[in-house]
Amino acid sequence: MSRLEEIIKKDIKSNGPVTFARFMEAALYHPRYGYYTSAENPIGRQGDFYTAPTASPLFGAMLARQFHEMWRLAGRPAHWVLVEYGPGTGVLARDVVDAAARDHPEFYEHLEYYLVEISAKLREKQRNELASSAAAATKCKWAGSLDEIRSSGQSIGCVFANELVDAFPVHLVKKNNHSLRELYVDIQDDCFYFLEGPLSRTELAGYFKMQHVELAPGQRAEVNLQARDWLAHVAAGLSKGFLLIIDYGLTAPEMYSPQRFNGTLRCFRRHRLVEDPLVNPGGQDITAHVNFTALAIWGRELDLTKLGLVTQPRFLLNLGILDTLKEHSDYTSSPEVLKKTGAIKQLVLPGGMGNIFKVLAFCKGFDHLPGLTGLK
């Protein structure tokens, strides 16, 4: 039994069954034993999963193109603050800033890049990664929240998050006959198991009503209430700027279709799917698909204007990722070109990251709706 498993079981024995959201939060974010706070390196070939930045620096270069356009649409301010939530190892920050310095020098001159990271271990990894780039080492700073950045008098130009929302703790619910029940985590024979009970929060029922969704009898689903809290925090921190969310997920009709009768909760360990989310807390990734319909509804309620929702391949193609191959005359024998084309295939073709990854953009404070190239 791991130390974290002992801690969770002690909590349950003392206070009773816990929501799955509470279990998932401990499993992923416990200050000492959580998956994201203690794992050596869960991302990449030697880890448990891949992300787009680990596939190729081209992902960061395309984002730099989009951020450059946002800066122009905002009127080319002298200080333009870009804030990345959930910066992981720091690879994406490095790639974005390097591309800005190389391809958009005027934008780079006015850019200030903040990484919002609460884990001391991850901050250290990010510093080591960014130290390899003079451009990134010059521009990048760290903060614990938007409030910390704004308290220094900074105006936020854009907040973005790549594969952040899918890792927020979720509540699990199940439709039983005519009522909605929540799944709690309890202990039986010294093992974790799911126990049905009443809803822990009234917002859980309202979550489905706002989407005009009625679950079928026996159907399970996830509810990501922390996503709304995060959206509200970001919306309050923006006066005139953008919010860009990149993640894998679905719209409501896809999310609650018959083929996802048991929900979208998944666990990964060493690139393998793990069926049981209650085993090995702190030792495996736990994730659920992002509900982009819910994000759009909440954004509207929070005075954010939705600019568009497109697949990640369409976003990257719109920004000209294929143009990067025009720099080369030999498309067959160059190792550099072969590596680049392989990365592009992974980023844009269905066999790679495909259409399950989507890009959702909001803006706030603009008199006219700014059109973004990536969302065409």
Image (tube, rainbow, N blue to C red):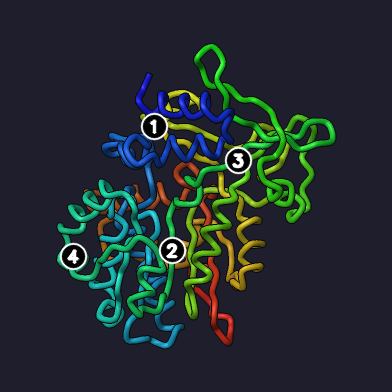
x 58%, y 85%: residue: 368
Asked if residue 259 is positioned above or below residue 132 in the image, the reply reads above
**SS for callout 3:** strand
The amino acid type of the residue labelled 1 equals Gly
Q: Which mark is residue 171?
A: 3
From mark 3 to mark 1, how far is it between C-alphas? 18 Å
Q: Is residue 163 left or right of residue 98?
A: right
From mark 3 to mark 4, how far is it between C-alphas? 39 Å
Looking at the image, tell me whether mark 4 or mark 2 is earlier in sequence order.
Answer: 4
According to the image, label 4 marks what residue?
A: 137
Instruction: Tell which of 95 and 155 is nearer to you.
Output: 155
Asked if residue 150 is positioned above or below residue 273 in the image, the reply reads below
According to the image, label 1 marks what residue?
A: 282
The amino acid type of the residue labelled 4 equals Ala
> On the image, which quarter does residue 364 sit in?
bottom right
Q: Which mark is residue 203?
A: none
Looking at the image, tell me whether mark 1 or mark 4 is earlier in sequence order.
Answer: 4
**SS for callout 4:** helix
Looking at the image, tell me whether mark 3 or mark 4 is earlier in sequence order.
Answer: 4
Closest to the camera, between mark 1 and mark 4, is 1
According to the image, label 2 marks what residue?
A: 160
Q: Inspect this view and state whether residue 357 appears.
A: yes
Looking at the image, tell me whether mark 3 or mark 2 is earlier in sequence order.
Answer: 2
Few, some or many C-alpha atoms within 10 Å of disc 4 (few <14, some 14-19, many ≥20)? some
